[in-house]
Amino acid sequence: MDLNKLMINYLAEEGFRPHETEFGIAFKSEGFNFLFFKDEDDEQYFRLMMPAIFEVTEDNEDTILRAMNDVNSNIKVVKLYTMDMEDEDGKKEVSVWVAFEILADTTPEVGDILPRALSLLKGARIAFLAKLEEFADK
């Protein structure tokens, strides 16, 4: 089984425009960016991410961590966490990423997994932003 190949084929057949990156497969859905990460050490590991949905700063870090914890404890299969990245100028940026992670069986049907994964990722993003707004109003 080659999840990367299955993903590329499925995305192309469904009209997405996937392209391979150093991390895996990148594509867009409804204006949002997604990354499918290939794990060379575990070919059953299915990890789809919605990158950089919110910037983390010193001023908002505590609130972000509380909102992430709330979403992580209430939505199945997804988790939010912070990632440190460097921009093109070498400046360090920290942002919130949303991940959908499962262990696929040895003959996965990507068409059964991907639509629900996208829905869960988008839903987690909405829940996270709503929770931030709720905390800001207190």
Image: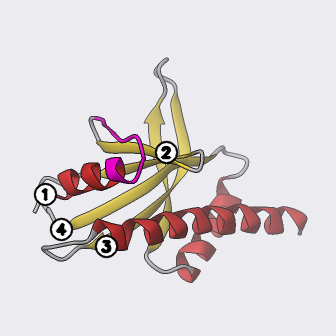
Q: Gap between marks 4 and 1, in whole Å?
A: 9 Å
Q: Earlier in the sequence, mark 1 or mark 3?
A: 1
Give coordinates of residue 80: x percent, y percent: 51, 63
Whether label 2 touches label 1, CB < 8 Å = no
Residue 3 location, x and y as percent?
20, 58
Mark 4 Cα shell of 10 Å, populated few (<14), some (14-19), many (≥20): some
> Along the line of sight, which residue is nearer the eye, 66 or 129?
129
Three-letter amino acid code of the residue under disc 4: Gln
The residue where tag 3 is placed is 102
Residue 40 sits above or below residue 121 on the image: above
In this rendering, the answer to whether 75 lies above or below 83 is below
State the separation of the CA atoms marked 2 and 4.
Answer: 23 Å
Q: Quadrant of the N terminus?
A: bottom left
Q: Residue at x 71, y 61 (%)?
A: 129
Q: Is residue 24 in view from this perspective?
A: yes
Q: Which residue is mark 1?
A: 2
SS class of the residue under badge 4?
Answer: loop
Question: CA–CA distance between discs 3 and 2?
Answer: 21 Å
Marks 2 and 1, how far apart in space?
21 Å
At label 3, the amino acid type is: Ile
Quadrant of the image occupied by residue 71 = bottom right
Residue at the disc numbered 2: 28
Could you classify mark 2 by the number of other residues whose Cα lies within 10 Å: few (under 14), some (14-19), or many (20 or more)?
A: some
